[in-house]
Image (cartoon, rainbow, N blue to C red):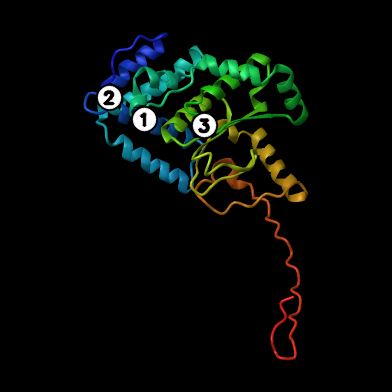
Amino acid sequence: MAHPVRFRNQSQNEFQKVFNQLCYTRMSWEVWEDFTVLTATAISNALDQTGPVHDKREQEYIRTIKKYGKKEQILFPQLFALTVQGLEDNPKQDFLGEMFMALNLGNHWRGQVFTPYHVCEMMAKMIMSEDEAAVKIEDRGWVGIHDPACGAGATLIAARNVLVEYGAPMSGALFVAQDIDRTAALMCYIQLSLLGCAGYVVVGNSLTEPQAGHPLAPVFHKNHEVWFMPMLYTDVWHYRMIWQRVQEMIGAAPVEAAAPQEGRQGPSEAIPASPRVEPRPEAPEPLQVEETGQFKLF
């Protein structure tokens, strides 16, 4: 069971009280894992309503929620609502990451420690100046931000808030994240989705299974589990993805077409992959045969 912790705001205090009600007969890390799965699935399947990926996640949702009694089941929407409230009250925080650390959940995940938000904010301002962000958005209409080891998303949340501080529109930022730990990746997906970011989160090893292709026309590894944020379904990003595909097909650097796989779902599914350009094989030289019937090697 989680231990009492002093938090900075009321939403965090309420979150812990509700969370503890689910930990009387279960390990806290198990409840947290179930919470992230249920919340992420509720967000994803609200827009991605058909297809094998939707069905697979819906089945996982049903299996997970059935582990709890009816009185316990109604507590998960409360945790969801408190997460929303916490991010609304103070967007400049890693709400779920802070709750994760305060509840000592990192011990189960081999001592996982998330970078404090204010450190991430400092890094975001050091890497991305106001002028640089404005120039990139003006040149092509958007700027891409990628974190290959996103954790709960503090770095990307900080980057989002820095762009807001600079006056950049959220329709001009694409957030791409990846993490080998599924629970951490889903925490990142939940928070960026609730903050109105457009992009996607990939569950997978960034070193052995990195993403390929252009951020607007990604090629996912067959083992990738991809979660598309709701704002990526808007028309502005849909047309940007189509335009990127068109550019690749008519002369930009070609990318290898992705094979049909579970990772290719959501907004990118309706966009055909650019054709793979195969080099034309050269005609083989005729074999040289000596009078004795032996082949000449040189």
Q: Which residue is mark 1?
A: 110
Question: Disc 3 residue type?
Answer: Ala
| Residue 269 image position (x, y, % from top left) | 58, 46
Q: Which residue is mark 3?
A: 149
Relative to 55, 199 lies left or right: right
Examine the image and state in which quarter residue 295 appears.
Answer: bottom right
**4 is higher (above) or lower (below) than 267:** above
Q: CA distance from mark 1 to mark 3?
A: 16 Å
Q: Give the mark nearest the N terminus, 1 or 3.
A: 1
Q: Secondary structure at mark 2?
A: loop
Question: Disc 2 residue type?
Answer: Leu
**46 is higher (above) or lower (below) than 76:** below
Q: Which mark is residue 22?
A: 2
Residue 92: tell me if it is visible.
no
For the residues bearing labels 1 and 2, Cβ distance under 8 angstroms:
no
- Judge the density around disc 2: few (<14), some (14-19), many (≥20) Cα neighbours within 10 Å: many
